[in-house]
Image (cartoon, rainbow, N blue to C red):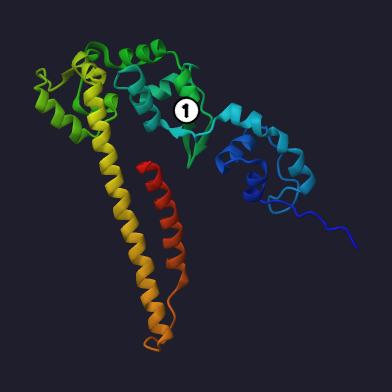
Amino acid sequence: MPETTRADHGANQLATLLGLARWQLRLGLEHGLLPEPDLEGDRWSAALAEGAVGRREEIVARFGDEPPIGSARAAARLASRVGLDVERGDVEVLVTRGDLDVISTFRGFPVYLLHDLDRLDPDSVRRVVTARKGPLTDTVDAGGAATILGWPRKTFDRIASERGLATDRLGRYALSDVQALSSDEHLTRQVGEEQRTMVLARTRRSETRAEDVVRAWILRCSAFLDRDADEPPDTAPLGRALRSLTTIRADRARQES
């Protein structure tokens, strides 16, 4: 009986073989930790793919388990960590100073690893923010306060009003007052629960919309089977709705756990 030839691998197949997410595979290729495709059509031969299996641990150790993020989210992550209103421009300055690496790009914009952001020296971040703000360093506007706290702007505005937080002539809040809110464990739990409730409500609405698309498709399909419609419904919307529904329900399960 002839020997079965092993198939070659596309990117998705290679990621599955190596136990990597697609973004991890992409970074591994960009940084030379994985071999480039050796076959036409950006495919890897079975031998080359199997030879790369042992690189998984190195790739996970280098890039982590969570995908890189852009400058806006990087600034928000640093703001929450150091208690200052970090902005996207501050992240770019940290890159220019050599304190932070751009690990890759996404749609032409730089992205950063979470563990690189978390390893940054807080004093380096403070120096960059202080240099930008100058005399305004000890105050923040409402948007900056919300960024530091990781809250929606409307949530901060409401709590600032409830707590009677004072503002200066420019409508700015004392940084110390905002940091005190961040240190209030009871308030942090309360806001966290409010945010979880809002996110879950949005997820449920998205689930309902996807379910409605599937139900409408079933009705149109039934109409065709019963000869009440001349043409069967297009299957493309059904496929998109089912994929969306699968993702949404997985998100909802995580949110409710």
Question: Image point 10% across, 27% down: which residue?
Answer: 162
Picture coordinates of residue 211, whole percent (x, y): 35, 63
Picture coordinates of residue 178, whole percent (x, y): 21, 19
Question: Image point 45% across, 21% down: which residue?
Answer: 118
**In the visual, does 120 lie left or right of 156?**
right
Amino acid type, residue under disc 1 in the picture: Leu
Q: Name the foreground residue: 188 vs 120.
A: 188
Q: Name the foreground residue: 111 vs 113.
A: 113
The single residue placed furthest to the right in the displayed view is: 1
Picture coordinates of residue 208, whole percent (x, y): 31, 59
Q: Secondary structure at mark 1?
A: helix
Q: Is residue 85 above or below residue 67?
A: above
The residue to which callout 1 is attached is: 114
Q: Residues within 10 Å of mark 1 (few under 14, many from 20)?
A: some
Q: Is residue 68 above or below residue 89?
A: below
Q: Is residue 53 above or below residue 115?
A: below
The single residue placed furthest to the front in the displayed view is: 257
